[in-house]
Amino acid sequence: HILALGAFLSSLLLTHDLRLSLNIAAAVLSITCPCALALAVPSVVTSASGRLFRKGLLVKDGTALERLAEVTHVVFDKTGTLTHGRQAISNLDDIPADALQRAAMLARASRHPLSRAITAAAGPGRLGADVREASGEGVEGMIDGERARLGQAGWVGVDGAPDGDETEVWFKRDGDAPVRFTFDDELRADARETLGELKRRGLSLLMLSGDQERPAARIAAALGGVDYASRQTPRDKIERLNAMRANGERAAMVGDGLNDAPSLAAAHASLSPGSAADASQAAADFVYQGENLRPIVEAVDVARKAKRRMLENFGFAALYNMFAVPLAAFGMVTPLIAALAMSGSSIVVTLNALRLAGAKAGKS
């Protein structure tokens, strides 16, 4: 409006032609309509979100694409994210039947993969009293009038627990001996390939696991030797993410468990599978469907491409105004041509965004 007013007054003072001055002001007003600038980002976000949705990936926040394009690191939870999370008790024959049933009375209150494995092995049954889940630690409650815990050795109260090669949890009821449950799990079929794709895109990888050292090291080795940290509590994960941010590193977090929700919220960007706990899905910026990890690579590719499209749109809008405004101000463009040019600039920006919808992953 200021430019149009300035053009009108300048023309009127120089030409004393009211009609010409009004035409110039109308042309400038049309040219400077910020439609192209206003569409520069939303058109790209809509196009990118539609593309990812067709790939089975839901974008929950428009700014998430820009943040994901900026990440330098990808941090993974292990159980249920890099692995299937369909755990099976490997030492079931060594566990007393009554201990299994009591442990299941706590496990039924949790959606953690290890708890689900215990519940599946025990079969249908009742729930303990006053059961609550301690994020990153385990589950506790009352069983037949006695306090019981199911979770990590230290939290359950088992001192000097052996550090085996398997994933484990412990169950202990007051007055009874502790019982150790060990589990087998498998990597997702495309886990190693997906992490390799992320590395080739210049991203650093880190696995944070609540498991003991040996099982965490075994999974890290199977993934091609990625960096990892074991015995990680939810607080440890958040502190690690905060330390990375303080060092200028921008991390995307991928996790599925209830204990991953704080880390997902603390990360620069976050992704969670559709099978994740409700709290994790609520905290994540992206939710992907299916058993594979490939959608993570797709999300990174589309996010980076979307950022380029946004910059291209801003650049085009700036160049358009740089050349079109002077032409309108000097009376070289009629109001009709100015209106058509304004509409044309919006169409160009939109078409540039739509290129993203049909582009192939990894291509520009």
Image (cartoon, grey):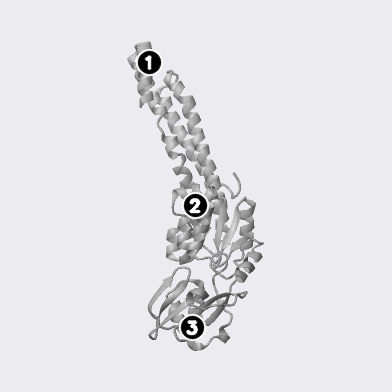
- For mark 1, give the secondary structure: helix
The residue carrying mark 1 is: 11
Q: Residue at x 60, y 54 (%)?
A: 204
Asked whether residue 202 is in view, the answer is yes
Give the image quarter of residue 261: bottom left
User: Tags 1 and 2 in contact by the CB under 8 Å rule?
Assistant: no
Name the residue: 45% across, 68% down. 135
Residue 189 % position (x, y):
61, 66
Q: Secondary structure at mark 3?
A: helix
Q: Is residue 326 above or below residue 364?
A: above
Compare marks 2 and 3 and give the one earlier in the sequence: 3
**Between marks 3 and 1, how big is the CA–CA gap?**
87 Å
x then y, percent, for residue 125:
42, 83
Q: In the rendered image, is residue 288 in sight?
A: no
Between circles 2 and 3, the one closer to the viewer is 2
- The CA span between labels 1 and 2 is 51 Å
Three-letter code for the amino acid on which mark 2 is drawn: His
The amino acid pointed to by label 3 is Ala
Please name the residue shown 55% across and 75% down the image: 168
Please tell me whether residue 325 is drawn above or below residue 159 in the rendered image.
Answer: above
Q: Which residue is mark 2?
A: 268
- On residue 122, the disc is 3
